[in-house]
Image (spheres, helix red, strand yellow):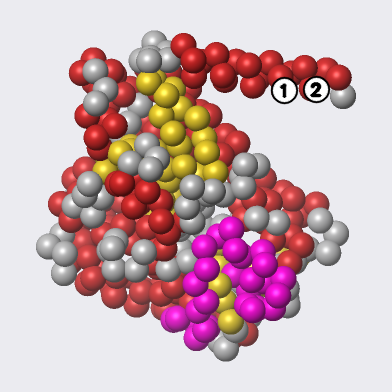
Amino acid sequence: MRIFKLLALAGAIGTGTAAIAADHTLTVSSWAPPTHGINATMWPQLIKMMEDATGGRVTAQIKYRLGPPPAQMDLVQDGAADLSWIFHGYQAGRFTATKLIELPGYEGDAEAASVAYWRVHEAHLGAADEHKGVKLVALMTHGPAQLHSSRKVTSLDQVSGMKLRVPGGVGGDAGAALGATGIQVPAPKVYETLASNAADGVVMPYEARKGFKLTEVAQNVYEIPGGLYRGSFAIILNQETFDGLPEDVRAALDEKVFGEPASRMAGTVWDAIDVAGREVTMATADNSINPASEADVAAWEVIAAQIREDVLAEIEAKGIDARAAHEMVKAEMAKN
């Protein structure tokens, strides 16, 4: 225990020293628990990437409870925080083009999807200008989302009539298409929503089984190959903060950190925490993973095809060649 405390103290001192030595210490607003993989792994890795790229001139410190998840975009725009991560589906109507990466049917992990996402944003989606007012640092997705519930679900037909916590975006579209009643609450509220029986289940990636303790309140997983959707996230930076950095620092961050490097790193972290969530499920005595039958997989593909058509039409209405962008996502994911 004494060694553990000393190591923890050394880590804290090291972090503090970096912050003191840096010319610019940015404030990160984060909303998941400190133990969540994004906070425990992704942010520290991104901070190290920024420190390495700038020779220690830029660092950052994480702060919690600056605002709820749906408020993060406004927090950064207003300068209450320098950096944050946002889930696009929490703000209906504000983001549409971002739904492209959430579509069911893609093959590949979160790293491949996140890299493809950034490249397709550069080629197509950026024209929608949906992140106007902030500096886009990275785009990322989690792995395939599945259905988690306290009552065992073994058939697609059982989903109809369930009260499901849905995240918005394509996750909400999927729930509606399956006949579920959607309840929208941000991820940190999922545990209490399920524990109070306000919802029968939730659609989320495997990561949530560990990160949000679903093993305790949603003991069963109904698993569809490729999942129901993939969540779309962005890492954003206050534009004035970025513009206020020295020119050579901005250039170093843009060249070595922001964009594809940060997107790839974030996707890799999602893959790792999704694996951890699945492993903790398999190791928990009263938890079960129930694979969808071949008939259900075929039935879901019919539903998923309609979701894709509807979402592509939404994105086309934004003046984007959605079908070309969709094909590019699949091609780019196949490369990784």
Q: Residue 13: x percent and y percent?
A: 63, 16
Residue 227 lies left or right of residue 78; in this view the side is right
Q: How many badges with numbers are in the image?
A: 2
Compared to residue 178, the image places residue 51 above or below, namely above
Identify which residue, 157 or 235, lies in the foreground: 235
Horizontally, residue 124 falls left or right of residue 141, namely left
Residues at badges 2 and 1 in contact (C-beta under 8 Å)?
A: yes
Q: How many neighbours does mark 2 have within 10 angstroms: few (below 14), some (14-19), or many (20 or more)? A: few
Which residue occupies 37% across, 21% down? 24
Q: Is residue 187 above or below residue 166?
A: above
Q: CA distance from mark 2 to mark 1?
A: 6 Å
Q: Quadrant of the C terminus?
A: top left
Question: Is residue 193 rendered magenta in the image?
Answer: yes
Residue 136 marker: none
* Displayed quadrant of residue 39: top right
Q: Which region is colored magenta? A: 176-202
The residue drawn where x is 37% and y is 48% is 75
Residue 105, above or below 116: below
Tell me the kind of residue under disc 1. Ala
The magenta stretch spans residue 132: no
- What residue would you read off at disc 1? 8
Q: Amino acid at mark 2?
A: Phe
Q: Would you name the residue on which mark 2 appears?
A: 4
